[in-house]
Amino acid sequence: LAQSWPRSRLTTRALLAPWVCSLDARLITMLGANAPPSWASAPIRRAAGLRLQMVVLLAAVTLPSAAALVQEPMRLQRLSVKRPSSPAAQSMLLQHRDLVALRGGQQLDPQLGELAHMTSAADVIKMAAVDIAVGLSDDEVLARREHYGLNQLPTKDRVPLWKRFAAQFDDKMVHILLAAAGISIFFSMIDTHADAHPYVEPMVIMTILLLNACIGVWQESNAESAIEALASYNPDQAKVLRNGQLSLVDAKELVPGDVVEIAVGDKVPADVRLVEMQSTALKVEQAALTGEAASVNKNVTYVSDSPDQVLSQKENIMFAATDVVYGKCKGIVVKTGSATEIGKIAKALTETEDQDSPLKEKLDQFGELLTDVIKWICLACWLVNLPKCGAKGMALTGADTVTWQIWMKGAMHFFKIAVTLAVAAIPEGLPAVVTTCLALGTRRMAAKNALVRHLPAVETLGCTSVICSDKTGTLTTNQMSVQRVLLVDKDHKLIEIEVEGITYEPKGRALRKGSPVTSADLSSLNEVSKVSALCNQADIVKNEAGVWERIGESTEAALKVLAEKIGAAGQGSEGDTPANDFWSAQHQRLAVLEFNRERKSMSVLVGNKGDDKGTLLVKGATEMVLQRCSKMRLADGSTAPLTNDFRKEMIKFVEDNYASGKLALRCLAHAVLDKKLSVNDARLSDPKKFEDVESDLTFVGLTGILDPPREEVKGAIAACKKAGIRVMVITGDNPATAETICRMIGVFDTEESVEGKSYTGKDWINMSMEQKRAAVRSARLFSRTEPIHKKEIVDLLQEPEEQGGPGETAAMTGDGVNDAPALKAASIGVAMGSGTSVAQGAAKMVLADDNFITIVNAVEEGRAIYANTKAFIRYLISSNIGEVVCVFLAVILGLPEVLSPVALLWVNLVTDGLPATALSFNPAEPGIMDKPPRRRNEQLVDAWMLARYMVTGTYVGVATVAGYIWWMCSNPAGPLMTFAQLRNNMACPKSTKFANNFGCEVFNDKRPGTVALSVLVTIEMFNALNAVTETKSLISLGPWANPWLILAVVGAFAQHYLVLSWPAAEVIFHVKRLTQLEWNYVLKVSFPIIIIEEIMKLVTRFKDSGRWGL
């Protein structure tokens, strides 16, 4: 060993390996075939111990560093060494490589998941490093699981409740209110001359902030439901072959390379490469993932030539969470967990952040501007009063000289006035009113079958400029339906029959040139009914809710429905499906010739009970079946030869009228074998002979099947166009079908060219970023897309204009798992009520009735809500500007405190809150859906609107201060002091006597402040009546158009009157009951706000239209 060690560890292993293997052989001989379980015998114990020592020695020599093997697994293959001559040494080399493979799954080709669809089944088995007859060993499973992880979808860490609660306070206006509350508490603690109830103000402020925070947390409670819903799409268990045994394991335990068996009714547990067919055909329902309406055939021999092939064209791959609806197979797991296609969707959901609504963006911007303005106004207010701090301190304490303590007392007083100014400037009731308005909107929309899961989504609909819609299940019913039946008349002319109905409900008529027709009228139509009912492995049933559903493949379910619509000659009338029941009672199934890709047809042998011979019924691809037909059944039941020319004529008719153009139907030819076929015919058990069996057929008819558009969609899209909203269809279906559906529903006109307006997923992949930006500006259809494409399209549509994007507000509709990332990324995601729970969880709104017109109604409601939101914002902000003007004007004029902070809070929250909420019930102005959508970056408050606010607010503030001055200087029952004496209130000599026996204590009287507060409240009630409409005169659209507003104004006024009459309110709000004289003055000074607003509306109308109309 010492001599061989410097040369090569491999040589050492080669020297030792034969001896160890011979020792193994002797051990086996000693144990024998029926060796006892006990290892008590000394020779065996010694042999086992010796072997253990040798294994340890071998490991020490050949495996000095486990880390080196993990880091450099193929190092041994790169060494220049001699090939071991001993077979035992070769065996040891293989064992070593297996050990390498077990350390991190390195033997598995890392490109297995990406190249499986481009590789033959045999090569995939090699890439997976697995024996398909045995499966993986337990050790291999553990090693691969350590490397690849569990077969689970990625999840997003939840934000703790306390963090979500704390985040609600991350707002500039909230910071100001918190500062105001903190300062009030601080001053109350250190002020020896504080009021009797010093903590009322901060407690009110904190209560408001806490309530707003609770509402915010509640609104975010559903954020992760979409990701959680994906878990329901993962199967719980899977049938896997391991250690040569087929067993049932938890699906999360699967690893790449596992051999799984999947049969009809199973949910695919991971992304699986098909390697062995155990039936003649295999069909998978993958509409939720790819958007394809019909189930798709899977093919073990298919090999792609493109690494970037779209999902729907990977015919040899079964995707996780899809359903097998026909057949049985064996496959190899190629992707697990987040690497699967559904895993990529889950990852996209966790990485996609919710879009802020346009209203929230504007309110945030407005809040930041307002915050900055408030800070400077408050600072200016305090600085202006600094010279008066000493005098105010003496007035408050009764001191005769100014000390620094007295000066600080005055400074604290003026600082509290600055805090009052901040409270006056912030519309504390705005968040609550916005939430209430949106909540009321959700109730109205729920009555129209639009269920809103995220409150801001209500308003977002109002500025929607593009609706991106999935096709299957959204614009169409996702229920295959026979639309056309083609027969041959006795004069060899084609008979075309239209079929009504677009769902699985077996109701609807068959119409020939507008007249109803049934199987009793046409013999060949009766045979079509027979083939449709019996050459079929699906069924239709009515569920507990009375809704018809399919069991099995969607195309076959459509044929079952057709049989009910055209009936069966001689059928009864009992049961839900009398035609299918009639055919089933008349015939029993003797044999099934399953579909395969080569002949593109399937057939059944049916006969009378007890017979060993029967009739072969066939359905399949038009051209393939017609090639095997030698005769054709005429409408009257007679039979005629099927000539080659007539065969070509039928095929051309189908291609020109059904397979493309206006209909894009999926066509199936129906045929029968007129001669009886024995059930013992050997060809029935040999799939290679099925085509031979299906020969010399008689053509009876043809059916054209389509996933039809919903009846209401065309009108809804026309309404969208009128409202300036572009409808863009994004689907995984093929371009021909998608373009046909788009023409049928009005996305494209009948003869419109689709160049530059219709793209495929492959086109999208090959585009540069600039080309993509150009495409989303003009496109109306994207077909053959994958889930990630949908999200990219939505993201680009919403890219801000300043970044080169179109700046659209996009609504995305969908129902499938594949739609979820785009639904979450869109400004507003809209899911179908019958769609997947994943789509509903990712969406902000769900359509309970699956009706596209509901989206249009919701857009109208959204526009009305935005108009109403502007109305109450205009009302609240103008009121707050009035309060700021009032406080600031009082400070500039040197007046005593006109309004207390608590009184301002009461006005902002309660008195103003009722009318502001009632404005949410304003009716939509006429023609609201005839206008183009507003741009996302449109200012909530433009220059003219701000001017209106300032004019109205200035009058509110001046009138409020005027009410205070009137009581002090002009009220016959008041002190009747001069304005100079009022301004000199801090230096009032104690001996001063005013009229009506008032002394200097009058400056602390509550009545002048009560008059000012009443003027403020009354003006704001009149102002609320003005806010019914932004531009129209009260003469043309009066407040009675919104009865709730009149009721709210009356209620708010009643609240104010009760506050003035409530003894406890004297302490809290610093108010007193008013006399009749004082009320007369309040009404007289308040009414002019109506006239001022009428003038402002008149100017607005002229500015917008150039006319002075009402």
Image (cartoon, rainbow, N blue to C red):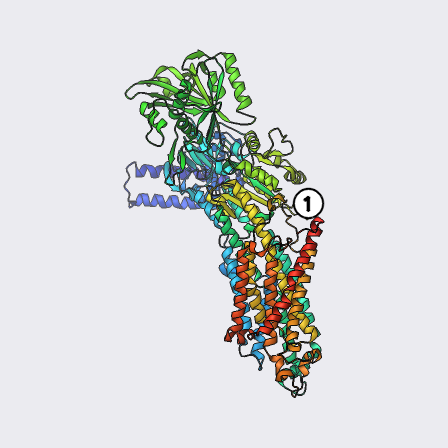
SS type, badge 1: loop
Name above or below for residue 867 compared with residue 893: above
Quarter holding residue 628: top left
The disc labelled 1 sits on which kind of residue? Gly
Name above or below for residue 169 compared with residue 705: below
Drawn side of residue 606 relative to residue 555, left or right: left
Regarding residue 322, the answer to whether it shows in the image is: yes
In this rendered view, identify the residue nearer to me: 182 or 950: 950
Q: Where is residue 429 in the image (x, y as percent from the top left)?
A: 56, 62
Regarding residue 5, the answer to whether it shows in the image is: no
Quarter holding residue 285: top left
Q: Mark 1 — residue?
A: 804
Q: Position of residue 710 (x, y in %)?
A: 50, 35
Drawn side of residue 463 relative to residue 105, left or right: right
Q: How crowded is mark 1: few (under 14 residues within 10 Å), some or many (20 or more)?
A: few
Q: Give me the residue at 54% from left, 59% from top.
A: 1046
Q: Give me the residue at 65% from left, 83% from top.
A: 994
Q: Position of residue 1034 (x, y in %)?
A: 62, 56
In this rendered view, identify the residue nearer to me: 420 or 764: 420
Q: How many labels does the image show?
A: 1
Q: Give me the residue at 32% from left, 30% from top.
A: 574
Name above or below for residue 996 compared with residue 469: below
In this rendered view, identify the residue nearer to me: 627 or 639: 639
Drawn side of residue 527 relative to residue 375, left or right: left
Q: Position of residue 725 (x, y in %)?
A: 61, 42
